[in-house]
Image (cartoon, rainbow, N blue to C red):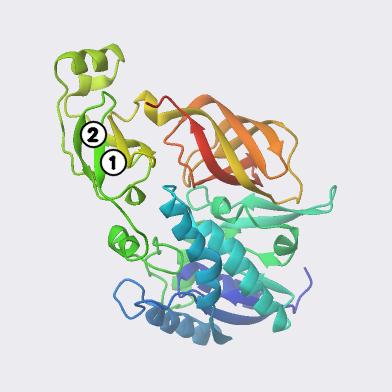
Amino acid sequence: MTAQQRIVVGLSGGVDSAVTAYLLKQQGHEVIGIFMKNWEDDDDSGYCSSNIDFVDAAAVADVIGIEIEHVNFAAEYRDRVFAEFLREYQAGRTPNPDILCNAEIKFKAFLDHAMRLGAEKIATGHYARVRLNAATGRHELLKGLDPSKDQSYFLHRLNQAQLSKTLFPVGELHKTEVRRIAAEIGLPNAKKKDSTGICFIGERPFREFLNRYISHEPGPIQDDHGRTIGQHVGLSFYTLGQRQGLGIGGLKAKGAALKAIQAKGLRGAGEHQPWFVARKDMATNTLWVVQGHDHPWLLSPALDAADASWCAGVPPAPGDYAAKTRYRQTDAACRLTLASPGAFSLRFPQPQWAVTPGQSAVLYDGEVCLGGGVIRTEAASHP
């Protein structure tokens, strides 16, 4: 990469994007900071502090010595990301808004804006890397070097045009090194806590937040023996594998139910084992739950995915790869079968836990993220 490029950095107010801007400035580039405001509903609440984040971003820009611009993408976020987020929840699925947010806002609306400013590249504080494959002439999305912070899962929908214009400087570093650099150069946000909330919406009570936007109807909670053991507050508020917030306590198995559980070889024979959400039946408005982390209903040997997006622009050849069906999951060996250009199936030698419709199945070939799709169905033992 030649020196003195104009690079627009998405400054979020966090330490990763701050160090990104600093590193690029040190390399001699002309760096411009952009702060994206993408959420306006109740933005004065304690949960969504974009004003505080902007103050932090502006302070960072001042220390580094770069310009910063405040840009409002709230309309684009609501139309392209939040509307789809609500549709998926209303349908009983569990979407990942960060993935759609990256594809539609950070690397589309933001990228377009940066290009209008005459930028040659954009940069963000994501823990991932981009490499040009000389043999194929294509840009590859790689995992970040810090395995505990790798964010390629959230970036798997980026295409060749987006990857060719994007830099991820902190993807070459470990988080501890990023924190060290921030402290060394006196960044005001060097010790700021990482955000973990919904992309641009912040860390707020999720059920209370979702309750404002989607309809819901209470219904029965049933276990794997058909017993009604409680009532849910609306299927949209639950996700497969969920353990907390079920409100059903440690129901003991007795009699025939106990024998059935013992026959399945589940540890603890059902005595005080935690409950997990195993299935959501939209047709009957029933939430099915099971006891024990390793219950067969929570394990899936295969899945089908749709709305596929491949970084190379074309699907990989059918065959053996690794996949993640949720963020922070260890890569799982799988076999890829292509159903159509936009759909695929994965089969796992080792069944995967709580494979969740609406989440993304992301494919890897070693350190290269190939792309992925949205999980539509999972093959598991269900009622």
The residue at which mark 2 appears reads as: 274
- Residue located 62% across and 63% down the image: 168
Q: Are marks 2 and 1 in contact (CB under 8 Å)?
A: yes
Percent position (x, y) of residue 104?
60, 65
Label 1 secondary element: loop
Which amino acid type is marked by label 2? Pro
Percent position (x, y) of residue 318?
72, 32
Comparing 254 with 27, the one in front is: 254
Label 2 secondary element: loop
Q: Is residue 26 left or right of residue 330?
A: right
Tell me the quarter of the image containing the N terminus. bottom right
Q: Is residue 168 above or below residue 243?
A: below
- Residue located 21% across and 19% down the image: 269
Comparing 11 with 211, the one in front is: 211
Percent position (x, y) of residue 214?
37, 60
Residue 28 in sight in this render: no
Which amino acid type is marked by label 1? Arg
- Residue located 72% across and 67% down the image: 165
Disc 2/disc 1 C-alpha distance (Å): 7 Å
Q: Is residue 85 above or below residue 225?
A: below
- Residue located 38% across and 80% down the image: 52
Mark closest to the chain's N terminus, 2 or 1: 1
